Amino acid sequence: MNNTYCVILRCLCCLSLFYADARAFSDEANSAPAKTTILETRPFAAGVWSPPVIEVAIDDARHLFMVDTGASATVFDSLLRDKLGRLVETRTSHLPCSDNARVEFFEQSSEHLPQIGSLVLKTNSPVACAELAGASRIVGREIHGIIGVDFLSQFVVTFDFDRCQLVFQSELERKPGRSATMLLHPNFPSPFIFGRCEGATPIGLMVDTGATNSGFANETWKESLGSGTLSLRGASTTLDVSGQTCPSRWGIVDQLHIGGNTLTEVAVTESAIAYVGIDVLSRFVMTIDFPREKLYIKQGNRFFATPRWMTAGIDFRLTDDLRRMRVIRIDDDSAAANSGLREGDELISIGGRPAPEMMSQLLRLMFESRGKSVALRVVRDGNESDIALPIIDDDLNRGIRIEPRKSGSRGR
C-alpha cells in the first residue's frame, strides 16, 4: 500500500517554527480588499486521490507547487535556490529514513517574489529549500515547491475537490458547510480535527492535503487493533522528500467518524502522528478559516466513491533495485489475468513511464483509462514483452495494492 513521504516532511518543515508565528498575517501585498472577500480562485490539478497542485509564477517562468496543509513551512526545490534571498541557516535534519537531509532556510528575495494569480506568495518567516524528488514521485509530475501553512494561514482557504478549485478569501460571508472542531497542536501550526473509530477514544487528526493516505499514531494504532476496529492488511512504507523509504504497516478501519460524517473502510498507515490525507479529504468540500481557527466540511461528489485500496485485483511489490514492480497476486477471473499478466512478472513501465514513478499514479491512470487499455512493459524469465491491460469498471472494485518490500528491505 503506497503511502506518502509527507509525515516525515512534517519533521523537516517544523524546523521553521524557530523563526515565526505561522498564523501571523503577512505584509500589505496580501491584505484583504475592503469590498470583497474572495481574493483569488485558482484551478488545481488533482488526479484520483492526488494532492492538489497549482501553478506559481516566478519571474517569467511557471512552476508547479503542491498545496500542503500538513507542511508548516513553504519549501522551494533546490533548483529555485537562486530565486531566494539571504541564507539564514543550514541544518542537517536527522529524518527517520534519511541519514543526512540538508535543509537550508532563506529569506525571500524581493526581486523574485512568487505569484499565485494576483496573490504574492510571501511569508513572515524564512522559507525552506530542499530536494523535492519525493514530492515529485508522489504527485506524478515535477514539483518545484510546497505551499505550507506559513502562507495559507493568512487566509480563509477552500479546497473544492468537486471543481478542483482553490479559493482564497479574507473572511467568510456564510458558513460553507458543517463546522468541525479545529484543534491547535502545541508543536504543529497545521489544522487538526477530531476523528473517532467505532468504540474507540476520539483522536486529533492532522488535516494533511499533502498526504495521499491517512495514518494513525502508534497508541491509536495499538488501541484500534486491540479493539478489533482496525484490521491489519500488510506492510507499507513512508517516503520522505529525498526519496528515501522505510517500512511501516497498514490496515483498514471499518468506520471513521469525522465532523458528523461516517466513512467506511478507510485505509490507514501506522505513523508517528495521526492525520487524514487526500483519500479522506477529497470526499469533501473543505474550508479552513485559519485566522479564526475554524474548519468546515460538506460531503462532495466523491463521498461515496470506492475506497482507494479497492481498485483492480492486482498486488505489486517494488523489486530490490527499486527499478521494477513485481506482480505478487492476480485475481483468476480478472481482466489482468485474461490479458496474460502473471504472478512473478516484473513491470518496467506503465503507460510508457518507468513503473516506480507511476506507483502513486497507477490508480489515477486506471480511472482515466476506463474502457481502454494501459500499456505495460513486462519482464518474464529474462525476456521483455508488451501487454495491454484492459481497464473495466468491475475490475476497479476488486482491489489493487502496491505492497512494499518486507521489513528490513528498501522499497515502497
Image (cartoon, rainbow, N blue to C red):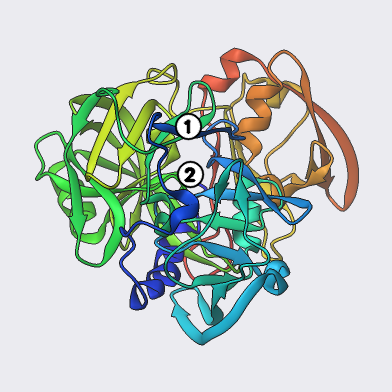
* Residue at x-position 19% and y-position 55%: 184
Instruction: Please tell me which residue lies in front, 235 or 171.
Output: 171
> Looking at the picture, how far across and down is residue 23, in whole percent?
30, 58
Instruction: Mark 1 vs mark 2: give the one in front.
Output: 2
Mark 2 residue element: loop
> Looking at the picture, how far across and down is residue 101, in whole percent?
55, 79
> Looking at the picture, how far across and down is residue 263, in whole percent?
29, 27
Q: Which mark is residue 212?
A: 2
Q: Quadrant of residue 297?
A: top left
Instruction: Please tell me which residue lies in front, 20 or 301.
Output: 20
* Residue type, label 2: Thr
Asked if the residues shown at circle 1 and circle 2 are in contact, with their CB atoms under 8 angstroms apart, the answer is yes
- Compared to residue 395, the image places residue 225 above or below, namely below
* Residue type, label 1: Arg
Indicate which disc, 1 or 2, sits on the residue closer to the N terminus. 2
CA gap, disc 1 to disc 2?
10 Å
Q: Which residue is mark 1?
A: 308
Regarding residue 201, the answer to whether it shows in the image is yes
Does residue 225 appear left or right of residue 371 in this picture? left
* Residue at x-position 18% and y-position 37%: 197
Mark 1 residue element: loop
